[in-house]
């Protein structure tokens, strides 16, 4: 037997595309977030509220990832922002090369911020760097308070946690204090916002924070 | 189920390093997979077998080395294996910790039989 030593990350190819994307974002001084969560936590609603709040103040573009449809892109397009839909045709996550292809349809020089909505999935997207500045994980109160412990990789790789559907706390079995503690036990440096896309609670704090980050 | 795309990534790497008839003599591909790499080992092995079945790599298999999730505390300097990916130091309770291992997903090496007869 002979042995060829390789010692190479399996996802090295994805990381190369991600590095190219990141270089492009830096060149255009573009602040890019990769929004991840389980299906139905309210990613698209959060993006809609964010676009509403930032309208006129900050030019934002959106890349939507979906397994099958362009329904989310249709929702986002109502806010008169440039939006590109990536349909993965069954694929459970976005990869850096798919994002790179989508970037060709956007005029990056006219934007200051790019929001990438990943496929709803708390497992697979955590492995794939897309070139973003940070991952933003959305966890909704209806999912319960144990999600950070069940899907630690996603919470470890994120910089921001949005606790969405906070208005539903009185009606669901979710201890927000425990949810926060669970998330911080996996990733102590998480910045946490509590939001409701129905009442608008917390949206302005989240958007103020985004404004600061995208202009720094 | 991103194990399928990871399996394709592994095959791509093997094909970069091994060419032509030598591919049929690949016996094992050794991987380092962290406990918290987000990969289900059974699914990965299943995916690899499925996509190599009718190819030159059909005699090859994955040999997976699991790496435990270990953190090092920056306060008390102690290294600990923690469960569920928790990064709080079990000794002093500090959250000032660094992940030392357990998130790897790496191809270590490829084993090739010399004459093609050493089928395992």
Image: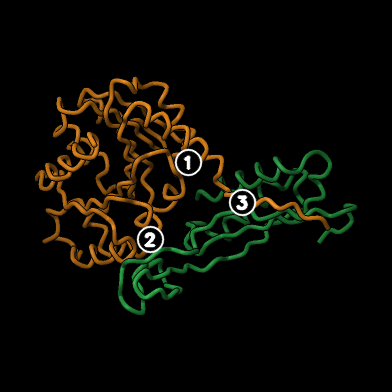
Which image quarter holds the N terminus of chain A?
Answer: bottom right
Residue hosting label 3: B47
A16 to the left or right of A206: right
Q: Residue at x 18, y 51 (%)?
A: A193
Q: Residue at x 47, y 37 (%)?
A: A19
Q: Earlier in the sequence, mark 2 or mark 1?
A: 1
In percent of width and height, residue B17 lies at: 72, 43
In percent of width and height, residue A140 lies at: 23, 53
The image quadrant that residue A62 belongs to is top left
Cα distance in 3D space between marks 2 and 3: 24 Å
What tint does the image give chain A? orange
Cα distance in 3D space between marks 3 and 1: 15 Å
* Residues behind callouts 3 and 1 on a single chain: no
Residue hosting label 2: A152
Is the residue marked by circle 2 packed among few (<14), some (14-19), or many (20+) residues within 10 Å? many
Q: Nearer the viewer, mark 2 or mark 1?
A: 2
Residue A91: mark: 1
Vertical placement of residue A183 versus B22, above or below = below
Which image quarter holds the C terminus of chain A?
Answer: top left
What tint does the image give chain B? green
Vertical placement of residue A35 versus A179, above or below = above
In the structure shown, which secondary structural element does the residue marked by tag 2 occupy? Answer: helix
In percent of width and height, residue B116 lies at: 88, 52
């Amino acid at each position: 037997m002979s042995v060829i030593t390789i010692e190479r990350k399996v996802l090295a190819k994805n990381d190369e595309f991600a590095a190219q994307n990141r270089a492009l974002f830096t060149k255009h001084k573009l602040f890019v977030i990769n929004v991840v969560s389980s299906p139905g936590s309210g990613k698209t609603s959060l993006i809609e509220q964010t676009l509403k709040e930032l309208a006129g103040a900050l030019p934002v573009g959106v890349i939507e990832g979906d397994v099958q449809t362009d329904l989310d892109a249709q929702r986002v397009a109502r806010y008169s922002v440039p939006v590109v839909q990536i349909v993965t045709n069954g694929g459970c996550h976005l990869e850096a090369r798919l994002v790179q292809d989508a970037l060709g349809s956007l005029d990056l020089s006219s934007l200051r911020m790019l929001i990438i909505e990943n496929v709803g999935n708390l497992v697979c997207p955590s492995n794939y760097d897309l070139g973003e500045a940070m991952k933003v994980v959305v966890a909704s109160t209806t999912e319960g308070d144990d999600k950070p412990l069940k899907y630690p990789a996603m919470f470890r790789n994120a910089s921001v946690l949005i606790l969405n559907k906070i208005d539903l706390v009185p009606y669901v079995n979710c201890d927000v204090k425990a949810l926060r503690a669970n998330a911080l036990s996996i990733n102590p440096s998480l910045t946490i916002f509590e939001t409701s896309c129905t009442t608008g609670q917390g949206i302005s704090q989240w958007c103020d924070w985004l404004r600061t980050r995208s202009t720094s | 189920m991103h194990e399928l795309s990871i399996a394709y990534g592994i095959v791509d790497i093997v094909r970069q390093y091994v060419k032509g008839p030598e591919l049929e003599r690949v016996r094992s591909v050794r991987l380092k997979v962290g406990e918290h790499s987000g990969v289900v080992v059974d699914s990965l092995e299943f995916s690899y077998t499925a996509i190599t079945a009718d190819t030159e790599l059909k005699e090859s298999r994955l040999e997976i080395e699991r790496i435990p999730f270990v953190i090092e505390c920056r306060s008390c300097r102690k290294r600990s294996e923690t469960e569920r990916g928790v990064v709080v130091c079990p000794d002093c309770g500090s959250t000032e910790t660094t992940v030392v291992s357990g998130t790897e997903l790496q191809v270590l090496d490829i084993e090739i039989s010399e004459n093609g007869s050493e089928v395992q």
